[in-house]
Each structure stands twice: as structure tokens, then as C-alpha cells.
Image: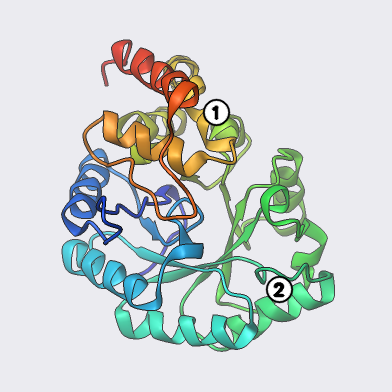
Amino acid sequence: MQVKWQGVYPALLTPFTQDDKLDFLLFEKNLEAQVAAGVHGVIIGGSLGEASTLQFEEKKELVLLAKAKLRDTFPVILNIAEASTADAIALAKHAVNWGADGLMLLPPMRYKSDDRETATYFKSVAVATDLPIMIYNNPVDYKIDFHPALFDQLVEYPTIQALKESSRDVTNLTRMLNRFGDRFKILCGVDTLALEEICLGAHGWVAGLVDAFPRETVAIWELAQAGKLNEARSIYRWFMPLLELDIHPKLVQYIKLAAQETGIGSEWVRPPRLPLEGEERTRVLSIIRNAIANRPVI
């Protein structure tokens, strides 16, 4: 199905059992909650989905399950985070066979490529697939900044259609829109900047805390689109202590704990990550439970 790259796209968690197997039942439960809340697509195997620890067959199983569950009602996007160009191209080709509707593409992993190398990497994947691609720019975590000027080189590649903008420089959104108009759809990739970027013209939001609070996330998007900014701000302000969990190195553990508390996830993570314990777990639980106790009526 066509990917519009607009609206709320959850970066789905990958739920595991306590013995480190994929928890397909919990994956379906969370997927159902996202659909019921009104999201516009889902992303599998992103950073929040513990992409670095997922095996090839596990990615395949998750995409196949999501497609079987959603059929053609919502686009299913597979993240590509590979170390080599050949592996990225191979996964893009497999994604077609599995039924994925689009790709999210990170720069090369492990090696800090320069601008020329990064652009060549993106181009190589773009010409190897007919699937639409969203480039993921996150220099804070991945140390490669594919800044707006570099997109000049990608304009002629029709499969490259969108940008997940996670530089935390809000001005990049306006820079991209000024430079390219609507050639590339821009989706905010940082939860704590979502409403700001939506108000500045972002086409969508790749969200993290949506995995635990889907209704609230979609409500902010819909209210902002309807021009009801006072209502959107009210939810956003309530949400902010939770959204700040998304910008911590342990965002996976934090958001999985939140999803467990709201009944649509579990806290089990794949090593080397470990579940939270001690004071840290108590502190994060306090943030989550305080938010739940004061949860707005949607």
C-alpha cells in the first residue's frame, strides 16, 4: 500500500519473554492498541525496537506478523540499520518479499562515514529497491549528521521520500521546508520536540512513548492538525515527564517499563541491556505512575 509519511508512526517495541524469545502475543496486543488509537503506520526494528540485537529471522517474523494482522490497513515500515552497503541492500530486497510497505534507513553502522560515503550509501539502497524510504538522521546517537544541504544529492532519487529528523535542532525542519518544499516529508523523531515541530509544519511524528500511551500521542497530533492548540498543549504538558524518557540512553528500558505499566508491554529486554533495578527503577516508575494517576481523559 502507499506510504503517505504523514501522521503518527510508532517506533514499535520488540517484546521479549523472560527467556529471551520474541513475545508474539504481546507484540499483537500492542499493535492492536496502536491501531485502536488511530496511528497512521508502524515501524519495526528501529532503535527502540532493539534493532542491534534482532536476528534476521526475527525481523522477518515480526514483519510477516504485522502484515498478517494489519493487511493493507496501515503501512508497515522496516528499519534498516546495517554495517555494510551490501547487507543493507540485501535486507531491502528481503523486505519486499516479506510484504513491507516501506523502509526507514539509518546511515552505516559502526563506521563513521563522511558526507560523500553516507550519501553514496543512501543512493545505493535507493536504486536497489522500489520501496519508499525515510532517511533517519540522528547525529546525537549515531554521530553522523546528514544535514539539509546534503539532501540536494537525493532529490533525483524517487524512492527517497521522507526524513525522520532527530538532530534535536528544530531549525532543521524549516531549513528542509525552505529548501525543498514538500519534496521530502519531514517527521519529528524526538518526542520532546513533537508539538513544536508539528506547529512548524512537520508532516508527522515518529513516536516512542506512543508504545505505552498511544491515545494521548494520537490526540496531540489530531488536536494540533485541527488547530486546537490549547487542548494539544494541555496533553503535551502532562506528557512531558514521560516524553523525556525518550531522550535517555536507556530509553528502551524506560519505555518498555511504561508499556508494562499501561498493560500493553513488558520490561524484558535483550542483553546486553538489562531490566532496570534499584533506585533507577523506582525513580522511573514514579514518573510513569504519577502520569497514569493524572492521565487526561481523551
Q: Amino acid at mark 1?
A: Glu
Which residue is drawn at the image coordinates 55% and 89% (left, top)? 128
Residue topped by disc 2: 154
When asked about the image quadrant of residue 122, the answer is bottom right
Q: Which mark is residue 150?
A: none
For label 1, the crowd category at 10 Å Cα-Cα, with few meaning under 14, some 14 to 19 and many 20 or more, is some
- Position of the N terminus, as image quadrant, is bottom left
Circle 1: element type: helix
- Position of the C terminus, as image quadrant, is top left
Separation of residues labelled 2 and 1 (CA atoms): 32 Å
When asked about the image quadrant of residue 260, the answer is top left
Residue topped by disc 1: 244
For label 2, the crowd category at 10 Å Cα-Cα, with few meaning under 14, some 14 to 19 and many 20 or more, is some
Q: Position of residue 153 (x, y in %)?
A: 77, 74
| Count of marks, rendered view | 2
Closer-to-camera residue (22/74): 22
Residue 298 lies left or right of residue 43; in this view the side is left
Closer-to-camera residue (34/233): 34
Closer mark to the observer between disc 2 and disc 1: 1
Q: Are marks 2 and 1 in contact (CB under 8 Å)?
A: no
Q: Amino acid at mark 2?
A: Leu
Which residue is drawn at the image coordinates 63% and 35% (left, top)? 200
Which residue is drawn at the image coordinates 50% and 20% (left, top)? 241
Closer-to-camera residue (45/66): 45
Circle 2: element type: helix
Q: Is residue 113 above or below residue 84?
A: above
Residue 39 lies left or right of residue 72; in this view the side is right
Q: Position of residue 168 (x, y in %)?
A: 69, 40
| Residue 212 at least partly seen | yes
Q: Position of residue 40 (x, y in %)?
A: 35, 51
Which residue is drawn at the image coordinates 37% and 16% (left, top)? 291
